[in-house]
Amino acid sequence: MKTAISIPDDLYAETEALAKRLGFNRSELFVKALEAFVASQDDDPVTRKLDEIAASLGTSTDPALDHVGRGLIDVGAWEW
């Protein structure tokens, strides 16, 4: 599908230079950029489920427990 967009002149110039350097035409570069942007906006289903579980558990009433998870992440205990 063809579409027309307006972008600042300096961004257009950078886009032209990047497309040339990468060996893409301008349209290919715009498509790749939009695909990457759209993909980055999708929620990761695993993260979404973990967020749901965490929300259902509520928050801790014990301040000592509030930093346990962060500590495990910081030391890499979550890695296999």
Image (cartoon, grey):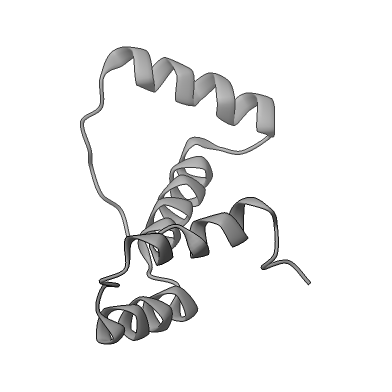
Q: Which x, y percent locates residue 80?
A: 79, 72
Q: Nearer the viewer, residue 38 or 53?
A: 53
Q: Which quarter of the figure has residue 24?
A: top right
Q: Is residue 2 above or below residue 23?
A: below
Q: Is residue 30 above or below residue 53?
A: above
* Tally of numbered discs: 0
Q: Nearer the viewer, residue 39 or 54?
A: 54
Q: Which quarter of the figure has residue 9?
A: top left
In the displayed structure image, the side of residue 31 where residue 74 appears, left or right: right
Q: Which x, y percent locates residue 74?
A: 61, 51
Q: Nearer the viewer, residue 8 or 69?
A: 69
Q: Which x, y percent locates residue 76?
A: 70, 57
The structure residue drawn at horizontal position 46% and vertical position 43%, both measured from the top left corner, is 27
The structure residue drawn at horizontal position 36% and vertical position 85%, both measured from the top left corner, is 53
* Residue that extends furthest to the right in the rendered view of this protein: 80
In the displayed structure image, the side of residue 19 where residue 36 appears, left or right: left
The structure residue drawn at horizontal position 44% and vertical position 62%, both measured from the top left corner, is 39
Q: Is residue 12 above or below residue 75?
A: above
Q: Nearer the viewer, residue 64 or 55?
A: 64
Q: Which x, y percent locates residue 43?
A: 38, 70
In the displayed structure image, the side of residue 79 where residue 52 appears, left or right: left
Q: Quadrant of the N terminus?
A: bottom left
In the displayed structure image, the side of residue 29 where residue 76 appears, left or right: right
The structure residue drawn at horizontal position 35% and vertical position 76%, both measured from the top left corner, is 51
